[in-house]
Amino acid sequence: MIIRSRSPVRISFAGGGTDVPPYPEQKGGCVLSATINKYAYSTLESRGDGEIHIHSADFLKSLSFRNAEDMTYNSELDLLKAVIKRMNPSIGMNIFMRCDVPPKSGLGSSAAAFSAMIGLFNHMKMERKMTDYEVAELAYTLERDELKVGRGRQDQYATVFGGINFIEFGRDWVRVNPLRIKKDHMLELEKHLVLAYIKPRHGTSNNIIDDQTRRYLSGDASTVEGFDRAKEVAVEMRYALLRGDLMRFGELLNEGWEAKKKFSPMISSRHIDDIYEMARRNGALGGKITGAGGSGFFLFFCEPNREHILSESLENHGLRPMTFTFDMDGLQTWDVSEYQEISKKFPVSS
């Protein structure tokens, strides 16, 4: 038996941070995001000896265990271990994981990896399979409670559902609202976006989230104002997309970035500010860091027919533009049992 899965990473447009407690419990949060055709891939191959072998291409790490009970968390492929321990498989298996984007890039790759892994086990269920909401919530719970990392819920729900979504967060509830955007408007949006990689984030996103949460809880006026405005921008941007008003979308991307920088001084830096100012001079109406901040990927919305100018300018400043299209399918799983002979020639792990 061989099962594969893939789950897309996401680009966030507005509202990021308002999904992080305690804001959604107190005021209700919302984010606008889209998944793109860059994926976390996972493969499960059954084995007859009951052992569990896991391999990550991204971290160049392979581990072997007699069973799930032998697994302990020690910062070595803990993400894969967490899913296996929770799903408690009754068979031996080889697990292989890789992702199209680097770790700590601000595109929600860890949530995509969690959902891809959960998708493998959910695919095997003969009776009641988990719903998309249940898969997303399990991915969130494992990352937050089991591994003590991650704070917000947007990444897990974005990757599982796929597409362009306005996602709302309250006290113990989440609502995913797919945007019914005209195909012409969606293609136009895709054309005008430029995504560029700066460098990996030093440390974890938790450092930034801890700081902005502390500031919010202390009542820091600038931080509270930033959160409230970020939520407003997400709502306004939703309606701009539904109207097909993409120039307003670009302006709101800029307003959202200015609001996000008020969360914490760790979100931006002189280097990031310089990149943003250069991008604005070369055709960007607006832009933002796609994750918690500090580094990773920069997303820009360009004036018509200036995407190539901005991309060239970004390359000249040491960034790596990355082409993409929207993914509308979210988490996908499939059987490849007919290729078992090929798999034996090219095994998942030793």
Image (cartoon, rainbow, N blue to C red):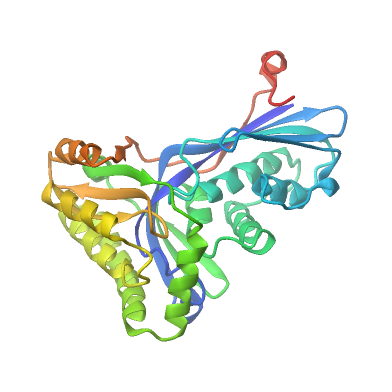
Percent across and percent down for residue 44 are 70, 33
Q: Is residue 242 visible?
A: no
The residue under the point 48% across, 50% down is 108
The residue under the point 34% across, 76% down is 228
Front residue (pair 59, 336): 59
> Which quadrant does the C terminus fall into?
top right
Q: Does 119 sit above or below residue 2?
A: below
Percent across and percent down for residue 67 are 85, 41
> Which quadrant does the N terminus fall into?
top right
The residue under the point 71% across, 13% down is 341
Percent across and percent down for residue 331 are 54, 42
The residue under the point 47% across, 75% down is 213
Would residue 50 appear left or right of 293 to someone viewing this image? right
Front residue (pair 312, 240): 312
Percent across and percent down for residue 50 are 86, 34
Q: Does 85 sit above or below residue 61?
A: below
Q: Does 337 sit above or below residue 268?
A: above
The image quarter in which residue 192 lies: top left
Would residue 68 appear left or right of 212 to someone viewing this image? right
Would residue 46 appear left or right of 77 to someone viewing this image? right
Q: Is residue 192 visible?
A: yes
Front residue (pair 301, 213): 213
